[in-house]
Image (spheres, grey):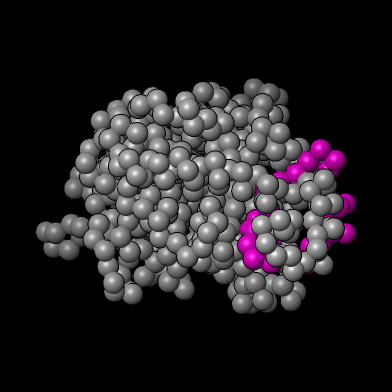
Amino acid sequence: MEREELAISDDLEEQAWKLLEKSIIYYQGRPIGTVAACDASKVALNYDHCFVRDFVSSALLFLIKGRYDIVRNFLAETLKLQPVESQFNAYRPTQGLIPASFKVVSTNDQEYLESDFGEHAIARVTSVDSCLWWIIILHAYVKATKDINFALQPEFQQGIMLIMELCLATRFDMYPTLLVPDGACMIYRRMGIYGYPLEIQALFYTALRAARKLLICAGDEEIVIGIDNRLPLLRDHIRHHYWIDMKRLNVIYRFKGEEYGHLATNQFNIYPDSIPYANLAIWLPKHGGYLAGNVGPSQLDTRFFALGNMMAILSSLASEQQSQAIMNLIEEQWDDLVGEMPMKICFPAVEKEEYRIFTGCDPKNIPWSHHNGGSWPVLMWSLIAAAQKTGRTDIGKRAIEMAQKRLGADQWPEYYDGTRGLLIGKEARRCQTWTITGFLLAKELMRNPNHLELISFGQFDLENASQACEL
């Protein structure tokens, strides 16, 4: 029986690799990325684009396999699309942004890249996470190839510094977190995550750590000092204000509102009656916890968001104790957070009046579908990576064994619907590239945990962080 399961697994991986090869796009004869999906049964829309966030799992997989050229070309070509001059036109992308996606356009004898910063996206949302993922991919490329000179090229140093200036200097608030509009990350439709969503903060922290390594040899001193100042503030802010376990829940339960001044305990003026204590107190295991979805003025979003929590573990934004507690929660509440397909993008789904208010009655984000509690197989790689980092390999094995029984038979769908992820997403594309690469990358991470070095960081130590170019 075990030999038969291994054969099925090998056949599935072979199928996945063939589909991945089919997804690669070429520009001027060179591979530069992968399309979002190769589903011939549906209108392409922008699924024929290469999305920066979608390419992350592809990039890590290619780096593991030594196929450095495609990642190098991707980084170089997307950098050329970055606006480098200050703009005062409200309808033009601001200086430093990396596009959400791009596609190769061929007209007559001319070939060029058409970028999308959100101008063509539904609701015209600008993807804040593209800048952060681009730096994280660049860092992974340098880690894999040991080619620090690639990142030290003037255009790359300028590109990193423009992103850092955008994130560190241009802001309207005084928190160490990054203020963004709704839909600025993997959840790119209205879902009530405007403000300071965990996913963006975890990516911001990871990108800061990567940028510090990449800039330390030749970077602007003011930017490096700015990163050094922000990192511990951001880390401590998230670990304290975003953390939810039974001990913290008891503190929040007794918050007093309308406190004023530096000595205020309830610094964000969270109203205790807005927290679903009855459900949370039952749901939280004794030794489990997680980072909340969002914290801001009178706002504590207690939904569990998968990618933010997994990236917090990988970047060490979460402490070691918190990381173990997050994995405890996933193990204890497996049916809710993972179900029959790794894993829920968020939990619980917003329903009834909350659904109408949060999503604007979005027909694609109905309860337990798409971004509103849907299951996304691409999240499997981050779950397995977090499981490896925390030494919880049993969780990783369980997730992979479950996924590989369905993904191939279901033709690698974009997402699944339902409280347990049993239904193929109502509008899901088939042969979704990041579903394919999420599975393949998860398998590679399970086989060799050393691959975690491409995406994982240890606890931040300012004194050791200053050692030049030790990637």
User: Which quadrant does the C terminus fall into?
Assistant: top left
Q: Is residue 197 above or below residue 456?
A: below
- Magenta range is 274-303
Q: Is residue 337 magenta?
A: no
Nearest to the observer: residue 189 or residue 232: 232
x, y percentage for residue 95?
A: 30, 60
Nearest to the observer: residue 127 or residue 37: 127
User: Which quadrant does the N terminus fall into?
Assistant: top right
Residue 100 image-quadrant placement: bottom left
Residue 138 image-quadrant placement: top left
Q: Is residue 300 magenta?
A: yes
Q: Is residue 32 above or below residue 47?
A: above
Nearest to the observer: residue 376 or residue 423: 376
Residue 78 is left or right of residue 231, and the answer is left
Q: Which residue is the extreme one toward the left?
A: 109
x, y percentage for residue 227?
A: 43, 43
Q: Is residue 89 above or below residue 75?
A: below
Q: Residue at x 47, y 65 (%)?
A: 172
x, y percentage for residue 465?
A: 45, 29
Count of all numbered marks drawn on residues in the image: 0
x, y percentage for residue 86?
A: 26, 63
Q: Is residue 227 above or below residue 80?
A: above
Q: Is residue 448 visible?
A: yes
Residue 196 is left or right of residue 153, and the answer is right
Q: Residue at x 58, y 43 (%)?
A: 235
Q: Is residue 74 visible?
A: no
Q: Residue at x 57, y 69 (%)?
A: 190
Q: Residue at x 42, y 45 (%)?
A: 226
